[in-house]
Image (cartoon, rainbow, N blue to C red):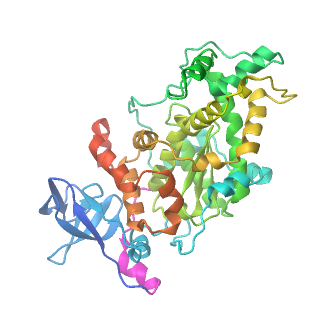
Amino acid sequence: MRGFPMVLIASLLAASCAAAAELPAIVHRPAVDVYAQPAFDAAKLTTLKRDDKVTISAQQGLWYELLMPEGKPGYVRVNDVRLEYASAEGGEANMRALLSGKAGEGRVTETAGVRGIDESDLKSASFNAAQLKSMVGYRVNAPVAAGWAEERGWQATTVAYAGDAKAGKDAAAPAGKSGSSKGTTARTVGSVLGSSIGGGLGSAIGGASKAIPKSEAELTEEELALGPEITGRILGARPLWQNADAQRRVNLVGRWVASQTSRPELPWTFGVIDTSEVNAFAAPGGYILVTRGLYQLLSSDSELAAALAHEITHCVQRDHYNVIRKQELANAGKDVALSATDAGKDSLAGSYARSYAEKNGAAIMLTSLDRKAEFRADEGAEYYLARSGMNPLELYSLLQKLTALGTDSAALAQLYKTHPSFDARIDHIDERGFGALEPYTMREF
């Protein structure tokens, strides 16, 4: 969005018959200039020092409004200070202060008594073909998303990213067509358990896996088969939110960001599922779901893009797909993966995907990735935001807002189980720095 409406705490809380909230924060840079307006060319009111305590009264775009001793507001950038984790009592008030929903229906989701999607839900849920068809029906192509982005002033920007996946650059032999011979079957199904999965699983298994060549085409075929099978089961646990505008919007924003990655050719498909918890799921092959609870907490298109960019990076980097491969290899003591499979009229990858999903459901979506994968997804999100014409600080702002919800928020229970803490993720961003992205942190959207 080109403009950012001021989020005034007092007016928001008056509407909900609650007292105004003030968010405590602390300066974590050696020196932070406070501006009279949310703009770098505004007059400077004062300079704060590291560890100075401040109080945030509102947020405007990527600026926090501070309560100043003189009674006049002052403004600092969202990465100049760090919000404190909310207490059990303060999380709801903080949510209304900084997380008032503008992306959905302009209201804040109540989180008391939230029962999130747990592993048992995703493992036992049936495949919902009708819901998956509905989700795919909202898919948009790259030109449509580009036209929509242009209307919002987003321009694609060339930004080199050393960590970008090199999809399509695979040096292995090209994939052959799936055949009915046992040799071809063993090779194709075995490619799920190919090399490149990391060590620690035993030299015998490792040696066997390295003996199985695999190509980029084979890996992608397996991803594309697994994605719908897993997504259909997530939708079996929680259906799509019946809000056509939200479904269209999440696909337009998501497709635009995905077009800036190294894998724009994936069938990128996005959806909002009907649960008030705050979470998101990235299934292999470019199928991404966010919860209604997360969607309604986001204040702008750019903030929605930040949430989606993190999940998009997981798909680009094949993070959950690689976990599946590790799990299957660890369970392949009797060489099940290399045995012949009668796929009938179906592709071997499709047969494998159904077999995996029937056994495991979509529980893989609640498997914790290692911290490096999560930190890499944050970094990738920043680069994809910059490439999409947005400010990489949108992710920083989102993590700050989630921090303000507090560790006792029921809506965040599953997110805390599967991700590093928000302050750990922000710490990593600060320690890594923005480097080549620094110029793009001056953007206002």
Residue at position x 72%, y 50% in the image: 233
Image quarter of residue 144: top right
Relative horizontal placement of residue 284, taking residue 235 as reference (left or right): left
Residue at position x 74%, y 50% in the image: 132
How many labels were placed on the picture?
Answer: 0
Residue at position x 39%, y 81% in the image: 11
Relative horizontal placement of residue 176, taking residue 211 as reference (left or right): right
Query: For the magenta stretch, what is the residue range?
Result: 1-17
Determine if the magenta segment contains residue 15: yes
Relative horizontal placement of residue 340, taking residue 268 as reference (left or right): right
| Closer-to-camera residue (185/206) | 206
| Closer-to-camera residue (84/4) | 84
Relative horizontal placement of residue 382, taking residue 305 as reference (left or right): left
Q: Is residue 445 visible?
A: no
Q: Position of residue 159 (x, y in %)?
A: 38, 33
Determine if the magenta segment contains residue 423: no
| Closer-to-camera residue (37/215) | 215
Residue at the right extreme of this rendering: 344
